[in-house]
Image: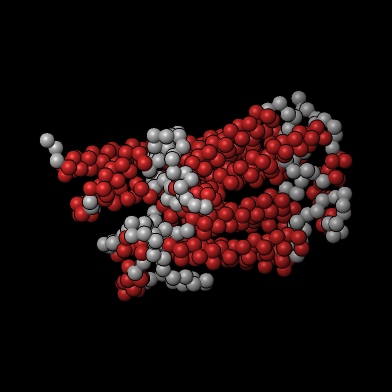
C-alpha cells in the first residue's frame, strides 16, 4: 500500500521528468516560431519600403510646390501644411531622426519585456534621474548585493542567490535604464540642431516637445512602478511584484511615445497619402471608417497584456512549481494541504492551456473580488480571460477588415498593408498561444512582445495611409487612375 509520502515523491518525480522533456520540446519549437516571426517582419519591412518608394515616385512633381508652400509660411488652406520646412533634404533628415527615435523606443520596450521575463526589474533598489556608473569593483558589487538582500524579492524568491547571478539581473535592469537615458540624448541633440536650422515648424515643435516631456516622465513612471515591487507583499505566501496598474501605465506611456514618434515621422516624409485618383481616395475613406475601431481593439489588447504580465497571470504558478522542484527541503517542510495545492497547480489550475482555461471555458472565480471592477485588473483568471477574448476579437476584426475591403477600389499600398496586417495578427495570436502553452520562455515571450509592437506599427501606418488628402491634391486628381499596359 502506497503511503502519502511515497505518493508525493512519485508525483514530484513525474513532474520533474515532464519538465525536462517539455523544456527540450519548447526550446526547439521556440526557435522555429522566432524564425517565422523574423521572416514575417522581414516581409512587412519590404512592403513598407515598396509603399514608400511608390509614394515618392508618384509625388516627385509636387516637391517644388512643397518648397514654395514652405517659403510662404505654409498657411495656404488649399495647399499642404508641412511639418518640416527647408525642402526635401530637410524632410529626409528629420524623418530619419524621428524613425530612428521610434526604433529606439521599440527596442526599449522589448528590452523592458526581457528584463521582466528574466525577473531582473527589482534588482536595483534605488534610482537617480541622471543615472550613474555601474559597480566597478568587488566592494561596490558587494554593497549593491547587500542592498538587494534587504528587498522582499530576495527574501522570498531569490534567497541564497550567488553574487554572479545577481550581477546578471542587475546588468539587465541597468541596461534598460541607461538605454532610456540614451534615447533622451539622441532625441534632444538633433532636436536642438533642427530648431537652430529652422527646419521645424511651430506645430511640429510643440508636438515633439510634448513627446520629449512624456519621455522624461517615463523615468519617473518606471521608478514609481519598481518601487511598488520593493514593498512587502500583503501575504506571507505572495511573491513580490510590481503593481499591475503601474506596469500598465509604464507600458501605455511607452506605446504613446512610440506611436507619436512613428506617426510624426510618417507625416514628415509623407505629407500626403498615396492617391492616384478620386476613386481610390473614396475607397480609402471607406476603409478608414473600419480602420479606426479595429485600431482601438488592437491598442486595448496590447494594454491588457500589461495586466496579464502585472498579475503574472501566465507564469507565476509555474515559477513557484520550479522553485519547489529544485528546493526539496521546502517541499518536505510543507504540510499535506500545501503539497496537494502544488500538485493541483501542475495538473492545470495555472491556466497554461488553450482554448480552455484548465478544464472549463470560463473559470468560476472570475468575479470573486469586490468591488466587481477590481476583477478586470487584479483577478488573475479574469485578466487572462479578458486578454484571450480581446486577442481573438482582434484577429477576427482584422480578418473582417480584409474581407470587407477585398472588392473595394483602393490603392495597392493600402491593400498590401491590409494583407500584411492579417498575417501579422495571425502570427501574433500563434505566438501568444505558444507562449502560454510553453510557460513563457524568454524567447517566445520576447517574440510575442515584438509581435504586439509590430502589429501596432502596421495599424499606425495603415491609418496614416488612409487619411484624407489635402484639398489641393484632390483638385488635381483624375476621376479614375491611369492604367499602364
User: Residue placed at 58% from the left, 33% from the top?
Assistant: 396
Pick the front one: 283 or 246: 246
Q: Is residue 71 left or right of residue 428?
A: right
Q: In which quarter of the image is residue 411?
A: top right
Q: Is residue 131 left or right of residue 103?
A: left
Q: Is residue 103 left or right of residue 162?
A: right
Task: Residue 232 in the image: state x and y as whole percent.
Answer: 39, 65
Q: Can residue 271 be seen in this view?
A: yes
How many numbered marks, from 0 up?
0
Pick the front one: 225 or 280: 225
The quarter in which the N terminus is drawn is top left
Task: Residue 13 in the image: state x and y as whole percent.
Answer: 21, 41
User: Residue placed at 69% from the left, 37% from the top?
Assistant: 290
* 403 in relation to 413, above or below: above
Task: Residue 397 in the image: state x and y as whole percent.
Answer: 61, 35
Q: Can residue 110 be seen in this view?
A: no
Q: In which quarter of the image is residue 202?
A: bottom right
* 402 in relation to 232, above or below: above
| Residue found at the very far left of the displayed protein | 1
The quarter in which the C terminus is drawn is top right
User: Residue placed at 41% from the left, 65% from the top?
Assistant: 231
User: Residue placed at 54% from the left, 63% from the top?
Assistant: 221
Tell me the colour scheme of the image. secondary structure
Task: Residue 359 in the image: state x and y as whole percent.
Answer: 39, 34
Amino acid at each position: 500500500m502506497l503511503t502519502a509520502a511515497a505518493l508525493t515523491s512519485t508525483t514530484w518525480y513525474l513532474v520533474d521528468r515532464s519538465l525536462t522533456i517539455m523544456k527540450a520540446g519548447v526550446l526547439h519549437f521556440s526557435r522555429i516560431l522566432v524564425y517565422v516571426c523574423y521572416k514575417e517582419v522581414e516581409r512587412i519591412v519590404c512592403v513598407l519600403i515598396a509603399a514608400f518608394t511608390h509614394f515618392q515616385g508618384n509625388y516627385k512633381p509636387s516637391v517644388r510646390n512643397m518648397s514654395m508652400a514652405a517659403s510662404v509660411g505654409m498657411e495656404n488652406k488649399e495647399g499642404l501644411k508641412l511639418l518640416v520646412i527647408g525642402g526635401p533634404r530637410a524632410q529626409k533628415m528629420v524623418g530619419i531622426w524621428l524613425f530612428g527615435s521610434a526604433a529606439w523606443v521599440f527596442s526599449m520596450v522589448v528590452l523592458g519585456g526581457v528584463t521582466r521575463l528574466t525577473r531582473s526589474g527589482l534588482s536595483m533598489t534605488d534610482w537617480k534621474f541622471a543615472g550613474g556608473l555601474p559597480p566597478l569593483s568587488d566592494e561596490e558589487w558587494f554593497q549593491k548585493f547587500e542592498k538587494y538582500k534587504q528587498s522582499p524579492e530576495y527574501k522570498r524568491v531569490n534567497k541564497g542567490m550567488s553574487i554572479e547571478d545577481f550581477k546578471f539581473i542587475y546588468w539587465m535592469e541597468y541596461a534598460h535604464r541607461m538605454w532610456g537615458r540614451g534615447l533622451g540624448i539622441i532625441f534632444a541633440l538633433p532636436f536642438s540642431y533642427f530648431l537652430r536650422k529652422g527646419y521645424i515648424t511651430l506645430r511640429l515643435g510643440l508636438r515633439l516637445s510634448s513627446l520629449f516631456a512624456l519621455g522624461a516622465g517615463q523615468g519617473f513612471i518606471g521608478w514609481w512602478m519598481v518601487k511598488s515591487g520593493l514593498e512587502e507583499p500583503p501575504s506571507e505566501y505572495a511573491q513580490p511584484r510590481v503593481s499591475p496598474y503601474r506596469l500598465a501605465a509604464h507600458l501605455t506611456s511607452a506605446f504613446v511615445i512610440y506611436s507619436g514618434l512613428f506617426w510624426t515621422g510618417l507625416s514628415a516624409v509623407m505629407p500626403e497619402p498615396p492617391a492616384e485618383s478620386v476613386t481610390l481616395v473614396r475607397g480609402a475613406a471607406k476603409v478608414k471608417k473600419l480602420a479606426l475601431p479595429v485600431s482601438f481593439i488592437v491598442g486595448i489588447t496590447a494594454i491588457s497584456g500589461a495586466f496579464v504580465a502585472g498579475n503574472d497571470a501566465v507564469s507565476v504558478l509555474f515559477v513557484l512549481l520550479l522553485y519547489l522542484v529544485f528546493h526539496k527541503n521546502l517541499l518536505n517542510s510543507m504540510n499535506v494541504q500545501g503539497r496537494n495545492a502544488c500538485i493541483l497547480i501542475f495538473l492545470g489550475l495555472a491556466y497554461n492551456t488553450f482554448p480552455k482555461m484548465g478544464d472549463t471555458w470560463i473559470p468560476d472565480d472570475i468575479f470573486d473580488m469586490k468591488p466587481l471592477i477590481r476583477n478586470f485588473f487584479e483577478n488573475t483568471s479574469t485578466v487572462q480571460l479578458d486578454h484571450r477574448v480581446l486577442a481573438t476579437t482582434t484577429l477576427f476584426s482584422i480578418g473582417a477588415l480584409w474581407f470587407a475591403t477585398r472588392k473595394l477600389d483602393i490603392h495597392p499600398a493600402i491593400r498590401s498593408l491590409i494583407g500584411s496586417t492579417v498575417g501579422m495578427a495571425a502570427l501574433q495570436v500563434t505566438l501568444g498561444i505558444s507562449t502560454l502553452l510553453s510557460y513563457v520562455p524568454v524567447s517566445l515571450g520576447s517574440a510575442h512582445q515584438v509581435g504586439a509592437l509590430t502589429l501596432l506599427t502596421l495599424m499606425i501606418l495603415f491609418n496614416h495611409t488612409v487619411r484624407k488628402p489635402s484639398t489641393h491634391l484632390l483638385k488635381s486628381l483624375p476621376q479614375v487612375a491611369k492604367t499602364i499596359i
